[in-house]
Amino acid sequence: MEYLILGAVLLVVLIGAGIGLLVPRRRGRIDLPPVTPGQVADEVSGGTDTLAPPEPEEAQVVEPAPPALDVPEPTAGRLVRLRSRLSRSQNALGRGLLTLLSRDHLDEDDWEEVEDTLITADVGVAATTEIVERLRERTRVLGTRDPSELRALLAEELIAAIGADADRSLHTAPHEDRPAVLLMVGVNGVGKTTTCGKVARVLVADGRTVLLGAADTFRAAAADQLQTWGERVGAETVRGPEGADPASVAFDAVRQGIAAKVDTVLVDTAGRLQNKVGLMDELGKVKRVIEKNGPVDETLLVLDATTGQNGLLQARVFTEVVDVTGVVLTKLDGTAKGGIVISVQRELGIPVKLIGLGEGPDDLAPFEPAAFVDALLGEAA
């Protein structure tokens, strides 16, 4: 009997242990309800939110911000701000002359040295003769050797030789029914397209709206270069395919300028050698085609100041073909021949209207004779 009781107890213990082992395992399972075919269809069609994938977010298109436009420096007083760029011309022309003139006694050799200094600075023989004769007479009569007085005398003579009364304004004001038109001309290698871009900045700085015409169709990079200059100040560029007729591009530029009602159309032309008759005739054609819409207001000749008297030979031919109204004299900061300003005007009767004094985008300044001479002479010793 005792054995039966022990057996029953062991059986109860074994059954209880078995139940204890089974219960934790059931608690570790997650039983999901059966899924019906209808529910599968709902999930695929988005009918329930239980297993539906999240809706993709709509792609946001971010428009690139327009490039910031340059704000060119105002042209008023720009030459005064750039006066230090004339240091080479200043040393050769201004300070050299003041040193000579301040000697205690000036003999014939001294005056010949004054003449040589002026001629070396490309003032020109005729202008040099006049300047020296007037200086000799005035210093003899006044008997002055004071540096400040000598500087004043020399400044007066140089300003008189340059011509203080010439019209140096750029005629860029629009007409009633059309914009003003400026035509840029010049020989190869003077940086004409770059200068054209800088002139556009001068016009924008003076409050004009500008459209550019890329009529230099011979160089593939010329139109791209001009367009880049225009984009910096918000000016549109009209261009044609490489090798297109320059006159046609120039005509289209003016017509588009009329339609857009801009103030000024600035037309760049290909650089050309002054002794190539065919190219010069083509330049004349460009101007004639433009003038079917109205007269050209300004024809600006770009000259490299470092070429000296050779620049005069170039200028004479251009004036015969297109009637140049003004000169843009570049690279004056890189030459001791600042007197080219005087010789260009005296020989050609054409005023210098703009001068370049560096490679910066705003290093092109309206030419002011008094400020220019003041910069050349520097401070009196």
Image (spheres, helix red, strand yellow):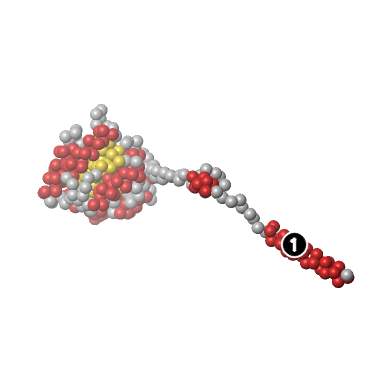
Dot 1 alpha-carbon crowd within 10 angstroms: few under 14, some 14 to 19, many 20 or more:
few
Instruction: Kindly tell me whether residue 351 is visible in this rendering.
Output: no
- Circle 1 — which element? helix
**Residue 68 sits in which quadrant?**
top left
Residue that extends furthest to the top in the rendered view of this protein: 176
Quadrant location, the N terminus = bottom right
- As drawn, which residue projects farthest toward the left? 277
Q: Nearer the viewer, residue 288 or 29?
A: 29
Taking the spot 25% from the left edge, 36% from the top edge, the residue there is 256
Task: Give the percent coordinates (x, y) of residue 96.
Answer: 31, 53
Residue 381, given in percent of the width and then of the height, sits at 38, 50
What residue do we see at 23% from left, 37% from top?
Answer: 254
Give residue 124's position: percent from left, percent from top.
20, 49
Q: Give residue 284's quadrant in the image.
A: top left
- Label 1, on which residue? 19
Q: Is 190 in front, or is 89?
A: 190
Outermost residue toward the right in this view: 2
Q: In the drawing, does residue 34 fall left or right of residue 263?
A: right
Percent x, y of residue 214: 24, 45
Relative to residue 337, is residue 291 depicted above or below? Answer: above
Q: Amino acid at mark 1?
A: Ile
Identity of the residue furthest to the front in this view: 1
